[in-house]
Amino acid sequence: MNKRIWAIFLLVAAAVLVWLLAPAPLPERWTESETALISSLSLSALPPLPPDSSNSTADDERAATLGHRLFFDPRLSANGAVSCASCHRPELSFTDGLPIAVGTGPGRRHTPGLIGIAYSPWFYWDGRRDSQWAQALTPLETHFEQGAGRAAIVRLLASDPDYKTMYEEIFGSLPDPARLPESASPLGDEPGRQHWRMLDPDLRFRISSAFANAGKSLAAYQRKLLPGRSRFDDYADAAAIPQGDTHRPGDSLSRDEIAGLDLFIGAAQCVNCHNGPLFTNHDFHNTGILPVLGQLPSVGRFDGVRLARDDPFNCLGEFSDAAPGQCAELRFARFDNELTGAHKTPGLRNVTLTAPYMHTGQMGTLAEVLQHYDEAPTSMLGHNEAKPLGLSSRQLRQLEAFLHSLEAAPAAAAEWLRPPQH
Amino acid sequence: MNCRLPIALTLLLAPVLAWAGEQAEFSVITEGGNHLQISSELSPLAINLMHSWRLRLTDADGAPVTGALFEVLGGMPEHDHGLPTRPEVTAELEPGVYLLQGVRFHMPGRWLFEFGMTLGEDIDGAAIEFEL
């Protein structure tokens, strides 16, 4: 009797071990719809970067050169020590490796990467900005990021001879620096706001215009940061044959990576949101991410839409170069409770190089992220759109293996990936 | 306007299920017996692109229904979420032909459009489901 119980126990244990560790069966061939999905993820399917109608200098090389210098210049901060590149570090795929950014003070959110982000219609984890240039302006006036304020930025442009020459060649004359206070901004501390209110309205407008142009230059630079081809792209292009074999000699992906791809576009449902060649739909989803200790849960996109609408630098604002009809994303942005707790879907190219993860860096490793999606816990705010997956640990490791196949150096000239050589 | 009941009835009585990809034109008999034909200006349909649709509303005799006020809802019932944008009918381009702007789908799968229509004193409703 005891022997029989032991035998049953061993059989059950063996079955559990097989389920946990055995390779997931890989289909011999991709179906037609799977082939189409795989092709849709390839970098070969990425269209040319669409123009930014709100930024007439978005593709101006001179603006990109100016933006490149501004991006790496710590003088664009209140304490003279924090540049855009302090948090968006080129060697870390333009992230900082920290759970939550640290600028002139402790931040509120995890630093997102910048490679390929120019394709997105929305910026920030909650989409509080609707263009890359409007996004670039925000840290410059946020006290815990760079916090310089717009008057100080324009003073720098007008008083640095190199900046002045570069700027005026593109945008025309800058205000006289002698007329500009050292610190003035409608968003700064109380003395800064008071200085701002005391300025002549015409000068306020000229400062804000020049400030917007600084953002447009920063955006022109960041549009150069495009993703490079990965091993996955080589596989996807080779597999773009109807009913193609899943695994062939000389494949750029291992069997585990291919199995991970099979899960990614199938049972794990990752492709629902991480779709397209950048592995993101650029939209907002509530996936039940818990807040970090000591923070209230973020309402996410619910606040983001309101902030984008109120932003004077948005697509419909007076500093935008777009006609109102070109601002469809902002005009038709959804604004209701369903977006509570929703955050932006990040792209996954180079995701293995940009730990930690989530909007406040709640998860240190990809294994934790995958475990989270496997469990799909109840959301503290709103509802979690994801459903539990019930994947085995082997399958989770295969998914992680697949994500490694998305690593690639950016497709940007080397000079854009380092500080400018003066 | 609460148009869920007529939409539910429409789904039961006159379901239209079409497979998108090549086709981006669907039609349905509305709960009130009108004919609603919708066609995407993006063809084939694709995810992650903002685009417009044309809605053609005719009565049972084929005459255009003019002056209709639309409310457009929808989403992905399988994922328990609505449309990612808030589309609006912004113009009646010609009698009975309306311009629906601000549509973007952000996930592959089955999508549902729900149309609530105010026709003078009457209300009407229709739903169209398709795979993307």
Image (spheres, helix red, strand yellow):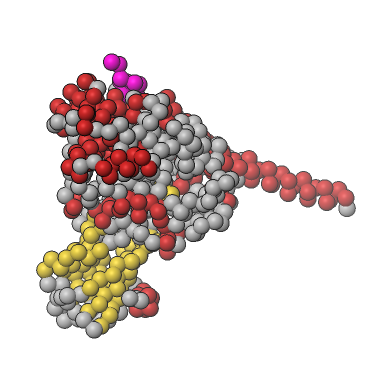
What residue sits 36% from the left and 40% below the top?
A191
What residue sits 47% from the left and 42% below the top?
A108
Residue A360: image location, x then y, percent = 50, 42
If the image is split into quadrants, where does the C terminus of chain B sit? bottom left
- Decide whether residue A86 is among the magenta residues: no
Q: Residue furthest bottom?
A: B121
What residue sits 48% from the left and 51% below the top?
A298
Asked whether the viewer can see residue A288, the reply is yes
Q: Residue furthest left?
A: B94
The reply, left or right, for residue B15 in relation to residue B22 is: right
The reply, left or right, for residue A235 in relation to residue A158 is: right
If the image is split into quadrants, where does the N terminus of chain B sit? bottom left
Residue interval drawn in magenta: A414-422
Q: Residue A117 is drawn in which quadrant? A: top left
Residue A385: image location, x then y, percent = 48, 56
Q: Residue B38 is drawn in which quadrant? A: bottom left
What residue sits 34% from the left and 72% below the top?
B15
Asked whether the viewer can see residue A84, the reply is no
Q: Residue furthest right?
A: A1
Residue A293: image location, x then y, percent = 58, 45
The answer to which of A182 and A280 lies nearer the viewer is A182
Residue A218: image location, x then y, percent = 28, 32
Taking A248 as reference, is A306 above or below it?
below
The answer to which of B120 and A407 lies nearer the viewer is B120
The answer to which of B15 and B3 lies nearer the viewer is B3
Task: Tally the marks.
Answer: 0
The reply, left or right, for residue A408 in relation to residue A326 is: right
Q: Residue B2 is drawn in which quadrant? A: bottom left
